């Protein structure tokens, strides 16, 4: 019975750490850039787009397709940074224990 109580206590502690980690990640912002910095996208730690910065030189109607591609690339980079930060924090909380495939953070 002591082992079960100990496991329950560890699970409760891990859950508390997970909640703290998620709150800390939500407060972060991740920026992705493309086109040598001409386009930037800012994402919250939950992946919500918080801002976009576009160099005025790209406002040429003839360059709209390139601008759209650059926005997608900047968003993808910001998303990769956000996911890497979440994975790093998860490693800290779980003590390096890898999650089973398909089990991810709830955001």
Image (spheres, helix red, strand yellow):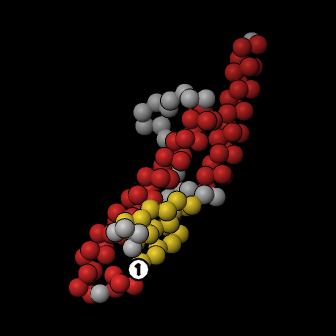
Tell me the quadrant of the picture where the N terminus can be found. Answer: top right
Viewer-closest of 37 and 83: 37
Viewer-closest of 92 and 14: 92
Residue 94 in the image: state x and y as whole percent. Answer: 60, 31
Residue 100 in the image: state x and y as whole percent. Answer: 46, 30
Viewer-closest of 100 and 92: 92
User: In this image, 75 relative to 45: left or right?
Assistant: left
Residue at the limit of the structure toward the front, as seen here:
36
Picture layout, residue 106 above or below residue 50: above
Residue at (43% x, 37% y) in the render = 102
Q: Total number of numbered labels?
A: 1
Q: Judge the density around disc 1: few (<14), some (14-19), many (≥20) Cα neighbours within 10 Å.
A: few
Residue at (44% x, 69% y) in the render = 40
Residue 25 in the image: state x and y as whole percent. Answer: 61, 52
**SS for callout 1:** loop
User: In this image, 104 relative to 10: left or right?
Assistant: left
Corner quadrant of residue 97: top right
Corner quadrant of residue 29: bottom right
Residue 95 in the image: state x and y as whole percent. Answer: 61, 29
Residue at (47% x, 53% y) in the render = 81
Viewer-closest of 13 and 61: 61
Picture layout, residue 69 above or below residue 94: below
User: In this image, 42 relative to 56: left or right?
Assistant: right
Residue for badge 1:
55
């Amino acid at each position: 019975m002591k082992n079960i109580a100990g496991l329950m206590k560890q699970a409760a502690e891990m859950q508390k750490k997970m909640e703290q980690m998620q709150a800390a990640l939500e407060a972060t912002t991740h920026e992705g850039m493309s086109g040598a910095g001409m386009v930037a996208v800012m994402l919250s730690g939950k992946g919500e787009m918080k801002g976009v910065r576009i160099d005025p030189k790209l406002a040429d109607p003839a360059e709209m397709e390139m601008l759209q591609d650059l926005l997608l690339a900047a968003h993808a980079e910001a998303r990769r940074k956000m996911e890497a930060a979440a994975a790093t924090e998860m490693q800290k909380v779980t003590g390096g224990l890898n999650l089973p495939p398909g089990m991810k953070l709830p955001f």
